[in-house]
Image: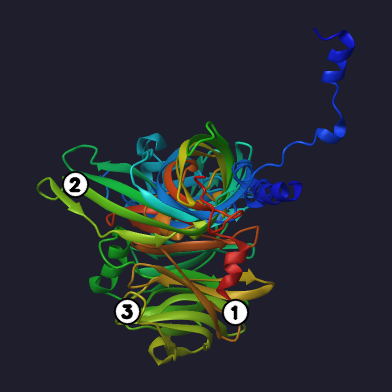
Amino acid sequence: MKRYLLLLLAPAILLINACDISDNDALPKESFLKIYDDDSFEASFIPIDVKETSKGDFIVLGATRLEESDFTGIFLIKTDSDGQFITQLDLSSDLIHPIGDLIEIDNKFYFAAMNNISWQANIIEVSTDSLTINSSPIGGLSYPLHLKQEGNELILLSYDNDDKNSVISVIDQTGAVINSQALTIGAGADVEAPIIEHFTRSGRQLPFFVGKTEGIYFFNGFFNYTLSLVFTDLNGDGEDGVLQGQRDDGGISAALHLDGSRFAFSRFNFGDNYLLPASNVEVFGTTSSTDMEGNPFPELIPNAPVVIKSVEINGDQVTLYASNTKGGQIVLLAYNNNGDLLGSKYIGFSTPYEISGFTQTADGGLAITGTVYVAGRFARVFLNKLSKEELTEII
Amino acid sequence: MASEAQRKKKSKTYPVYDVPKRPSANESFLKTQWWLGFKAGANSTAASPETRFSGFSPINYNATENEKSYEDYEGVTGHAGLEITFYHHGWSFSLQPNYRRQQFTYGNDYTWEETNNPDNSLVLDYSQNHLLDYIELPFFIKYDITQTSFRPFIQIGAYYATLVNAQKSVKISGTDFASGNAGPFETQELIIGANDLFLKSSTGLAGGIGFSYDFWNVRLVFDATYRYGLNNVVDVKNRYAINELASIGDAMDDIMLKNISVSIGCVFPLRFISEGYQSTN
């Protein structure tokens, strides 16, 4: 009798020991996908970049459409480490056209924007606690295009509308210009038109960016009638080398300096996209991007925006590409230093997703931001946090 | 008239003559028995939200505006399994392993409206249906109220269930007031594998009433049972990690399941089965 009762009671003992129930209280810190919705029909958000604060919160820099201006306004979102919305800053003020990168220096965040009357470039400091901002004009520079931190330097690419120059400058956090080089885009309104359309978002968004190799600065912008990757030492003697594009129909769409003269590139040419994860370039010569071999990616949308960054996965530095597919998803492609594809991952389902930026998080994961078209039509910000394990699964 | 000594002598008994009468086969059958058989039925589920979560993170409105509305005991699903029961003096100890499908549904609405022209608006209705397949091990203690061929009984017990499969389907319908007219539309139904969305384990208490009826050599059992879940069946780690769900603006609440099931079964006695014996004896 006792033997039978024990047999019958065994399942009851089993249920008490269901351990996944007792473990089911973890917060979704390691991995989440959050969509930040606004119930205004006319609202439209354009995320630019994301960074993690020292407390593990996230700051997303973005832009919003403004009714009263042809340019975009400044928009910031702060979330906690779980992606829960904390606060936002929607600045429909005298500062417009925010640009990345979102840069962290001593627990303060910086980005660039411009004055809506004088078009003067400003560097904006953001306090992470309350998202209050403090702006400083960047002396003599207008129409900012890209801000990047390389070591201790802040490098800015801007456009000089008066003299029709692309201008690359080294600045500091107060807006003081330390060094600068202006290079002509070429004469005539036709050359300038795509730049202005880029600012007003009435045309294509062009891949303007800056960076630095060992002692040589580079920018991707208009030079001599063509969207080109231009190398210069900022010594006032003009360009040192040029990787030419095809007017605004072809050129480099993203670049990451690997070592020496090796770069991870992506390029576009009349709508086609090519990835070149380990490519040598003549820094001190004149070459053409159309001559560069590359892996064709017809999966990507025409002239796709591409973000390339180096992230650490399993102790190795991996070159991670992110771009937009024709299927409305974001694709992450991981390459090793030799340019071998290690793996890929797709983000997005049901509604279109577009990449804006990503950053590696302190826990070894990845935070990705971009645009999601809620209900297929409303441009909203998403934040996707991949855990360290999910990032590792890519390779 | 018997004397006092004679009365004492009559009432005196001797142990050797006091051996109780050996029970007949019938009596033993009725008092102690193993039963084995099959059982199947229908069930309906309600999901009770404990803590609510929003698929979208609103930045200019309250998340409660998009709160889910649960439809309790809407759909009917099925279950089938075995019944193994040990009966002793009116009490039964019953293990009833079964494969069961449970279903629950909720919906929520989203509205986007133009600030200066409310006529330009879009209303979307999301209807989200969940099918959960469990292998369940319930254990019941039953008490037969009568000891006749028709036996009403009450039962209480507990269950442990392990998830085998989970599926979620989403229907999106809406009205686009900005398209030139109040144009209603429906999108294609999305069906998503949702195993990672739910915990493997589910436990709870159960209680119910029923009756059994003995005829020929079998016992027909009918019961109605209420199950009360004791744990959150949603895997909180994956609430926001499932790409597909966040994309459609969904995040599961913490929910406990409640279930009403009716079953009919047929069980057979395992002892004293012989050609000349019937359970109705």
Q: Residues within 10 Å of mark 2 (few under 14, many from 20)?
A: some
Q: Are marks 1 and 2 in contact (CB under 8 Å)?
A: no
Q: Are marks 1 and 3 in contact (CB under 8 Å)?
A: no
Q: Which residue is mark 2?
A: B175
Q: Which residue is mark 3?
A: A225
* Visible residue check, residue A306: no
Nearer to the camera, B141 or A83: B141
- Identity of the amino acid at label 2? Thr
Q: Chain of mark 3?
A: A
Q: Position of residue B19 (x, y in %)?
A: 79, 36
Q: Position of residue A356 (x, y in %)?
A: 43, 62
Work out how far the residue at label 1 is from the one at label 3, CA to CA, in angstroms. 28 Å
Answer yes or no: are tags 1 and 2 on the same subunit.
no
Nearer to the camera, A107 or A173: A107
* Visible residue check, residue B232: yes
Residue at 16%, 49% in the rendered image: B184
Work out how far the residue at label 2 is from the one at label 3, CA to CA, in angstroms. 49 Å
Q: Chain of mark 1?
A: A
Q: Position of residue B225 (x, y in %)?
A: 47, 39
